[in-house]
Amino acid sequence: MVAVSSRKSSATWRRALGVVLVYGGTAGLLVAVLQLTEYRFLVVQRSMEVWVALVAALAAAVGIWLGRSLRREPRVVVREVPVEGPFVRDEERVRKLGLTPRELEILELLAAGLSNREIGERLFVSENTVKTHCRRLFDKLGAGRRTQAVRIGREGRLIP
């Protein structure tokens, strides 16, 4: 996540505006000086080339300055995230609840979001058998629905 301070951003834009105004004022002053000192021979003989060169130089200078001043350095945000080790099932809790290996397998597949039909196909059992295992699992966990059983299973370290 990259955070850019709005104060710094607005200060940069104010500084850029100040420079643009200074360059504009300088260009206006240059025009006034040319008229006051009556450099007519330069203006009359090479008028288009002089004005194009002045405008191009001014635009190039402003562009270079803005490019350098508005460049943003990339910021790297490092955040430490606690990582648990590999999943270890709470075998004591499994034994207390009296869960069978098949019921634990059903619970893991419920957590994966599979339907009864998909669980049956995966385990090569009928859909009614899956419903029976789910009913017994819900009774042992004290859950009323699939989502509740999955939450209880994860909180009790029965499934990852």
Image (cartoon, rainbow, N blue to C red):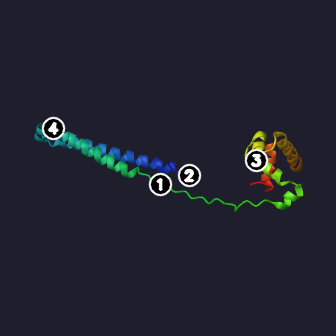
- For mark 1, does the 10 Å Cα neighbourhood hold few (<14), some (14 to 19), or many (20 or more) residues? few
| Type of the residue with mark 4 | Ser
Toward which corner of the image does residue 155 lie, by quadrant? bottom right
Q: Residue at x 85, y 61 (%)?
A: 92
Q: Secondary structure at mark 1?
A: loop
- For mark 2, does the 10 Å Cα neighbourhood hold few (<14), some (14 to 19), or many (20 or more) residues? few
Q: Vertical placement of 79 versus 9: above or below?
A: below
Q: Residue at x 25, y 46 (%)?
A: 57
Q: Position of residue 65 (x, y in %)?
A: 34, 50
Q: Earlier in the sequence, mark 3 or mark 4?
A: 4
Q: Quadrant of the C terminus?
A: bottom right
Q: Which residue bears the numbered disc 1?
A: 74
Is residue 143 visible to us here? no
As measured in the structure, the alpha-carbon distance from the residue carrying label 1 to the one carrying label 4 is 45 Å
Q: Vertical placement of 72 versus 121: above or below?
A: below
Picture disc at residue 47: 4
Tell me, yes or no, whether the two marked residues, 1 and 4, touch with CB atoms within 8 Å. no
Q: Which residue bears the numbered disc 3?
A: 109
Tell me, yes or no, whether the two marked residues, 4 and 2, touch with CB atoms within 8 Å. no
Question: 47 or 33, which lies in front?
Answer: 47
Q: Which residue bears the numbered disc 2?
A: 1
Q: Position of residue 29 (x, y in %)?
A: 25, 43
Toward which corner of the image does residue 119 lie, by quadrant? top right
Q: Secondary structure at mark 3?
A: helix
| Type of the residue with mark 2 | Met
Tell me, yes or no, whether the two marked residues, 1 and 2, touch with CB atoms within 8 Å. no
| Type of the residue with mark 1 | Pro
